[in-house]
Image (cartoon, coloured by chain):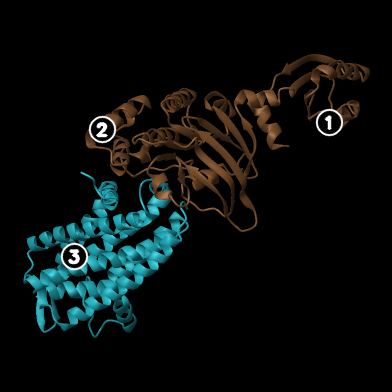
Amino acid sequence: MKIPAFLRLTIRNVVVNTDMGTMIFMLGLPTLYLFVMGFMFQGIVPTGLQIKQNGLDIPYTTFLAPGIIALQSFTAGNIGGGMLWSDRRWGMFEQIMVGPFRRFEYLLGIICVSIFFAIVGSLIMLAFALAIPVSFNYNLIGVLSFLVTIVMGTILFSSLFLIISGIAKSMQAYQTITIVLFFLLDFASTSFYNITSSTPVWLVYIADINPLTYISNILRDSFIYGVNYQTFTSMGIIFAGMVVLFAISMRVYRNIRSGI
Amino acid sequence: MPENYIEIENLRKTYDGKKYALDGLTFNTGKGEIYGLLGKNGAGKSTSIKIMTTLIGFNSGKGTVAGYDIVKEAAKIRKCIGVVQQEESYDFATVENNFKLAGLLWEVGREERDSRMNELIDLFGLDEIRKKRMFDLSGGQKKRVQVAREFMHDMKVIFLDEPTVGLDPIMRRKILDYIRQKANKGLTVLFTTQNLEEADMICDRIGIINNGMIVEEGTSSQLKNKYGNLRTLTIWAGDESMLSKEQVQNIFSDLSFDQLEVKENVITIITKNLEKNLGKIMSLLSANNIQVERINVENPTLDDVFIKVVQK
């Protein structure tokens, strides 16, 4: 059976990335967040920390779980987009480009592996969340909006890391940018906590332009509060961000010369 | 079937718009031929390989590889070539997985993949490290994997950009023998190296590239014959004779040499007319009270040809 070029590249990307380090980064860290942060914060308040949002009081662990699932789109985007950088760094980009592949197939391989990791990672996180347990409401629209958002969010973050991979000139530069983004996007979003009237304004601004905020909010709507008008607005914002970043990444990618 | 398997005509390439990395590169190879591209660092060897493997564009000229145009039929070329880059290239995986992934990417069937992998691992002496991750290997081991991995797929032309750098002599010989076997079966090989001894050993024809163009071309023996009258005379003067280059140049001012070097009490002369001038050289040294302890005359090697050609 003939496997299309982009699928062969996707399989290769999966094999190359299923090492212990990547798995810990993709699954271990969010699992720790979910269990350690979830229970530790929950334990701060003797009666159990409750998050009040959209007129509902929910346990912190239930609030946190969709945020952790949302992180999978960021982590998978980082792994996928970062592949371009490591392939350039270790000579495989050039090697693949002199093989039976076109540039867009290489790119498609990266996007596909990111989506694959994001969906698998999200489902694993969902399973862990259910083990806590958390109380989610399931319905078809909620599941669909979860899947669509994870895919869009992953393409958005893959594009972001593709851009960084395309412009970073050294390992130090790439790693520094990645670490700063990791902390900024992860923690200045609503993945771990909600925005309240006490949140400093500058942090609210950062959270408002942070895609992870919208992805976390959409997933909370999908699993807890119910899909509503605001959910679709957030999806529209993610879609727009995805299109813009993807277009920029295309431009950067087209101009990439092999090697670093 | 094209008569010339690689045909490059007047290629010019500049990276900065000022200096030309390739400046009228022209050469061709036949099917099953091992063509060696020799040149000093920055002569244009890697740039020419990058163009022929369709990795980068060029400013003018034309070329075909395996009968396909390097601009219009780039995708067809990439389906029938193999490339071993000068730089490291490997996946973050075990040695075995690097072979398997190469097979997967080139659509080699699973059974064929495993049998080729085992054959290559055996041939390139990689059995002990087959389960190791690439990161844990030495530079020479990585290079062996890189070269061996490229033979996981069938191809018509292989481009080898300094494939033996960092390898021990035994492994180098093994790899060269393997490449020769493949060429005997019809594989066309474009081989770049700075190791002239191995070029002498393996290449059917050699092109010496300098400043982005082929400045000399032929079989190893043709090149040596062409520069055959260029011989090296080494003279060891007595220990008490501390010589300067100026002093020796003055002594031999009536004679013309291609190259004259003086290091402590050793004079090295490279000249076309050694037989005619040897008597005169010895007389001049004697007349200037320079005691000669020993002399040695060497016939040209490919090294001499190379040095002569790139210094022309």
Tell me, what hue is chain B? brown
Say whether mark 3 and mark 1 are on the same chain.
Answer: no
Amino acid under disc 1: Lys
Subunit that carries the residue with mark 3:
A
Secondary element under disc 2, as helix, strand or loop, is helix
Q: Nearer the viewer, mark 3 or mark 2?
A: 2
- Image vertical order of residue B70 relative to residue B138, above or below: below
Q: Quadrant of residue B101?
A: top left
Q: Nearer the viewer, mark 2 or mark 1?
A: 2
Amino acid under disc 2: Glu
Is residue B64 shown left or right of residue A144? right
Which residue is under mark 3? A69
Which residue is under mark 1? B245
Secondary element under disc 3, as helix, strand or loop, is helix
Say whether mark 2 and mark 3 are on the same chain.
Answer: no
Residue at image coords 61%, 25%:
B220
Tell me, what hue is chain A? cyan
